[in-house]
Image (cartoon, rainbow, N blue to C red):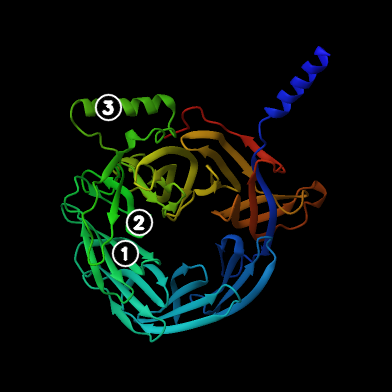
């Protein structure tokens, strides 16, 4: 009897303490044939549980071929729901897009004039509306957002910042006051749907690098200006997220010497008043060396050496100058507060290794943006830092500065992922803990008898729940030797990927782990 009980107890231990199986799996794939001899451009917009929108652009003004936009909406199973087409007038070129819950907007401008066209696509049924208007000529458009029936366009005119509103209802244009100033840059244009307000975050390029938030109502009237003139450090950028009807949190990165190189991140609470803004709460500065895991992308020896240098400077009463460039994502509200994600990068030039520190030699050729790592921080609603973590990025170079790391939150866990040469690199964290270290997943074709011979413009997007969307261009050939004479085909692909604890995967890549450090530079 005792022997039987022992066997039962051992079986209970085996079942009860079996580690959960968790990995990325490819659940669905959609392929669109691509013609390398045609001018084609593909764009994918995830719509959460409502599906995904694909925009296919064909034709070119340069080649004098008609430009056409084909919109296709698919459900979460990548089944086509509707398709519609829009023939773009040859006199227009596209300058910006904006996505909302109900619509996708495209902004077009006539060449060398002040004539603009706004195109609104209804996501429910594919109905297209157009709105024409005159803004100003020689405008370098930077950001474009929509609130209600008002479009807000920011940019630069003769080097000075400008923000304008355009009414879809009567086509009237207003210039937001107080913006046309020399040596000032727009850090962010943010829409507050609940309060029906527009926040323009700006910083000055003058000696003291003033940072301010200018808030306008729906009718483009200036409500209040919040200046951070008394800040002890130079605020480089900022993102706003409301935490209740009276308060928002402002989070961003800062420097100590009025340069674009970040020393750390900051957070402060902003109290909104009816006629103005009450005094800002004290700004909390968090230097990179204060984050528990920020430097974990480095090898342990180099990490210790860097932190030792920083501590030595502090012991001498001086600041150690970090020289990091940050791409800060939009803040993600959570039940506890918010999550901040930022990617660290530097411009890479062929023939030199000094761009990371900001110094260049004379004849070096620019190659693109080299990403080193991403870091993620959790804050409560009072702006208190709860945890931080690090996600190393290896061998990732992009010609455009775009958000490469995508984050999927699953309860109190986060799945971090980015694309690289036809593979998806993942890591799973829980607060400052790493639950599953770096893994590689190779994107698959529709059949096992095919192989990917070339992959380009790989992109990854967090979709809904535990699902991601991977897309890009691939060349595909038969894998069997008997079919070597069959020509390769080129496709634009969309793969639905799922990260689940009980989801098996086909041909997942081998895991590459890090123990308190990655490769580093």
Q: Can you say which quadrant of the picture contains the C terminus? A: top left
**Secondary element at image label 2:** strand
Q: Is residue 260 above or below residue 242?
A: above
What residue is at 27 percent from the left and 71 percent from the top? Answer: 162
**Secondary element at image label 3:** helix
Q: Quarter-wise, where is residue 357 in the image?
A: top left
Near mark 1 (Cα within 10 A), the count class, few <14, some 14-19 or many ≥20, is many
Looking at the image, is mark 2 or mark 3 earlier in the sequence? Answer: 2
What residue is at 42 percent from the left and 75 percent from the top? Answer: 148
Q: Which residue is mark 1?
A: 199
**Whether residue 158 is visible:** no
Q: Is residue 65 above or below residue 206?
A: below
For the residues carrying marks 2 and 3, which lies nearer the camera in this image? 2
Looking at the image, is mark 3 or mark 1 earlier in the sequence? Answer: 1
Q: Are circles 3 and 1 on residues that touch, CB within 8 Å?
A: no
Q: Are circles 2 and 1 on residues that touch, CB within 8 Å?
A: yes
Number of numbered discs overlaid on the protein picture: 3
Q: Which residue is mark 3?
A: 311
């Amino acid at each position: 009897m005792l022997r039987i009980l022992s066997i039962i107890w051992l079986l209970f231990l085996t079942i009860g303490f079996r580690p959960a199986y968790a990995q990325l799996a490819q659940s669905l794939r959609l392929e669109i044939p691509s013609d390398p001899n045609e001018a084609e451009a593909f764009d994918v917009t995830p719509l959460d549980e409502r599906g995904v929108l694909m925009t296919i652009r064909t034709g070119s003004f340069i080649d004098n071929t008609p430009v056409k936009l084909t919109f296709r909406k698919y459900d979460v199973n990548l089944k086509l729901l509707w398709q519609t087409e829009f023939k773009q007038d040859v006199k227009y070129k596209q300058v910006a897009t904006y996505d909302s819950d109900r619509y996708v907007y495209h902004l077009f401008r006539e060449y060398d004039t002040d004539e603009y066209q706004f195109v609104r696509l209804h996501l429910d049924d594919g109905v297209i509306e157009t709105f024409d208007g005159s803004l100003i000529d020689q405008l370098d458009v930077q950001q474009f957002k929509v609130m209600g029936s008002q479009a807000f366009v920011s940019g630069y005119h003769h080097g000075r910042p400008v923000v304008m509103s355009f009414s879809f209802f009567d086509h009237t244009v207003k210039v937001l006051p107080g913006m046309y100033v020399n040596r000032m840059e727009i850090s962010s244009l943010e829409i507050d749907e609940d309060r029906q307000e527009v926040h323009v975050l700006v910083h000055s390029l003058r000696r003291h690098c003033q940072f301010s938030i200018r808030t306008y109502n729906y009718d483009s009237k200036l409500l209040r200006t919040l200046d951070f003139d008394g800040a002890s450090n130079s605020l480089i950028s900022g993102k706003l997220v409301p935490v209740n009807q009276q308060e928002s949190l402002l989070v961003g990165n800062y420097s100590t010497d009025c340069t674009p190189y970040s020393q750390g991140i900051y957070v402060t609470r902003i109290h909104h008043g009816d006629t103005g803004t009450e005094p800002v709460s004290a700004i909390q500065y968090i230097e990179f060396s204060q984050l528990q895991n920020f430097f974990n992308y480095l090898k342990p020896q180099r990490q210790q050496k860097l932190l030792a240098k920083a501590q030595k400077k502090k012991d001498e009463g001086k600041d150690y100058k970090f020289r990091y460039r940050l791409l800060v994502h939009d803040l993600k509200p959570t039940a506890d507060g918010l999550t901040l994600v930022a990617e660290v990068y530097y411009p890479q030039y062929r023939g030199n290794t000094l761009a990371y520190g900001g110094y260049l030699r004379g004849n070096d050729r620019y190659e693109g943006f080299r990403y080193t790592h991403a870091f993620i921080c959790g804050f409560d609603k009072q702006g208190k830092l709860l945890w931080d973590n690090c996600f190393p990025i290896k061998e990732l170079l992009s010609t455009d500065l775009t958000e490469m790391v995508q984050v999927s939150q699953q309860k109190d866990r986060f799945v971090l992922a980015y694309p690289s040469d036809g593979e998806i690199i993942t890591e799973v964290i829980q607060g400052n803990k790493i639950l599953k270290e770096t893994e590689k997943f190779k994107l698959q074709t529709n059949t096992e008898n095919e192989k990917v011979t070339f992959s380009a413009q790989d992109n990854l997007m967090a979709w809904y729940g535990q699902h991601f969307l991977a897309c890009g261009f691939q060349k595909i050939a038969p894998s069997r030797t008997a079919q070597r004479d069959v020509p390769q085909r080129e496709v634009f692909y969309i793969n639905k990927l799922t990260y689940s604890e009980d989801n098996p995967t086909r041909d997942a890549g081998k895991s590459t782990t890090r123990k308190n450090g990655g490769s580093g530079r």
